[in-house]
Image (tube, grey):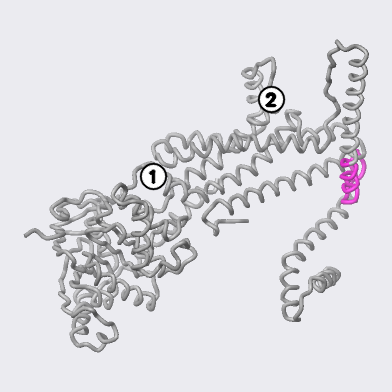
Amino acid sequence: MSSIRMTLAGVSSIAGVKSNDTLSSWLKRTTRALGLPLLGILVFLFIWQVGAKQIDTSLGQFPGPEQVYQQAGALVTEHINEREREAGFYERQEKRNAERVAKDPDYVPKIRDYTGKPTFFDQIGTSLVTVLAGFAIAAAIAIPLGICIGLNSALYAALNPVIQLFKPVSPLAWLPLVTMVVSAVYVTDDPLFAKSFLTSLFTVSLCCLWPTLINTAVGVSAVSPDLQNVSKVLRLNWLTHVVKIVLPSSVPMIFTGLRLSLGIAWMVLIAAEMLAQNPGLGKFVWDEFQNGSSDSLGRIMVAVLVIGLIGFLLDRIMLFLQRTVSWDKNAITR
Amino acid sequence: MAKHLDISDVSIEFPTPKGPFKALDGVNLKIEKGEFVSLIGHSGCGKSTVLNIVAGLHQATTGGVVLDGREVNEPGPERAVVFQNHSLLPWLTAYENVELAVKQVFKGTKSKAEMKAWIEHNLELVHMTHAMHKRPDEISGGMKQRVGIARALAMEPKVLLMDEPFGALDALTRAHLQDSLMEIQKDLNNTVIMITHDVDEAVLLSDRIVMMTNGPAATVGEVLNVELARPRDRIALADDSQYNHYRHQVLSFLYEKQRKVEDMEQRRSIRRSEAGESSEKKQRAIG
């Protein structure tokens, strides 16, 4: 801790903090804002390091922070190498085709795609695209439907049992059904989307629909009676009432729902990818597990940390959106 | 000649699990154009219910309200309400809050420029032009209530209904707003019904004070004509014997004739059920 304090003092003197008084208060604030989280991380790393040494698995010792750091580096190198190989492949192909066209002007060059194994970073990309698409579909269904059932208490009463029934269903239970339905229904010769992508997508949508739906409905139905009276005194028509009073007043609740949904979407996606062997981070983890080399556990641990980091960043992005869009700056922002 | 506003024989019953609850019984009140009438009474005596019936937000079980020869059946901007807790839309600025009302009432009769001038004029009346582009959470409680009054005035109502408009404000802000209201009233001479539980406020502002008996089945107890010359000055009146006489009459009605004996146990149980309800709503929301 004392070393942190010293470095902080060093930083502050560079920043040019002048009077002693502001220096100490600045130090206090910075220690709270940076020092405590840093301390938490250090303690976690220490426990991890010590704990990892105690665990021996059939694949060797459980990876500590150091091995995981090395594996992260290895994954980056692999990715760069793979990209170079791909660039090289296309370069050679182009050259070959150019030579053949030079020899024989009638020759129509064939362009083949590179068929390398997707790297860790390719899998991250796939997972991000899938989760965002699945979340978008869920939001596009849940928000309008939530507004409808929030406005109409009869509709709410009718749909509530169905919502409550499906809300707690695990993604793993949906997955086989979604897989079969996608295979049966999505039959084309020239598929725009891979079936695996659609399976993951719909599983994610089905599971993360509910929080947005419920929170939107509650937000819409819980418009303050005072504001409803204002609307009545002004004799606002139905459409104006919904657009000017109901929707703005439920925006904070809708965002609460969206944040919960996005969190669920990300968790569901990883599980679905693992179980269905669909491309993405889940498949990466599963492949490493099946691979069973001495590096596997370290690589899985890298994936775990990256999954956590991406989940955190997705939540922060939603929070940022909420702060920008919503009028209620005092809504829960943790 | 028929009166401007005629509340005749109004009774209302609310259905409860234990059978109908009679809140008001035979309320009669006739109000002239330009008259400022206060309703005063203990909390729970049905003052707000009377106001809500005039506003059209509640329907009387028997009897009815006639405004300029037409029966009141539904809410409308000609009976604008200033709510106790301002009820401004929190996502709109002061200007936009008034604009919503003006657009609704003067759609087709005022041009865009006229509407803008009218909105600004009404905000000017309540001395809010300096903060008209601020949102409710950026201004103080007193300022919010000023905007609420501007919104109601901007509807050019036949009757202005005020439901404890200054009840949630501190004493100094309240005095300030009362002065503003008297100033506005001098120019516009609106017909006003105001609910209050503040004796000084009632005597200072009103032409007539209507004192209500305790519920259930509350009704008009006494009516007091306040014949103090306008403009009224609160400091000068503080030593005025006539003013103090009026105060005394209202106080004696409230604390001698209609002394409130509240059942503490009943009150506690009501609070508990209210608290339970709100936490239930919260739990339902977090899915």
The chain that hosts pointer 2 is A
Q: Is residue A108 above or below residue B174?
A: above
Q: Nearer the viewer, residue A47 or A83?
A: A83
Residue B194 percent location from the top left of the image: 26, 66
Which residue is at a point 47% across and 61% down the rendered structure image?
B135
Which residues are the magenta region?
A55-76
Give amino acid for label 1.
Answer: Thr
Residue A58 quadrant: top right
Left or right position of B137 against A16:
left
Which residue has dot 2 on it?
Answer: A193
Q: Nearer the viewer, residue A193 or A205?
A: A193
Residue A117 visible, this orientation: yes
Q: Nearer the viewer, residue A76 or A333?
A: A76
Left or right position of B255 against A232:
left
In magenta stretch: residue A75: yes
Which residue has dot 1 on it?
Answer: A240
Which residue is at a point 92% across and 23% down the rendered structure image?
A95
Q: Helix, strand, or loop for circle 2? A: loop
Left or right position of A71 against B26:
right
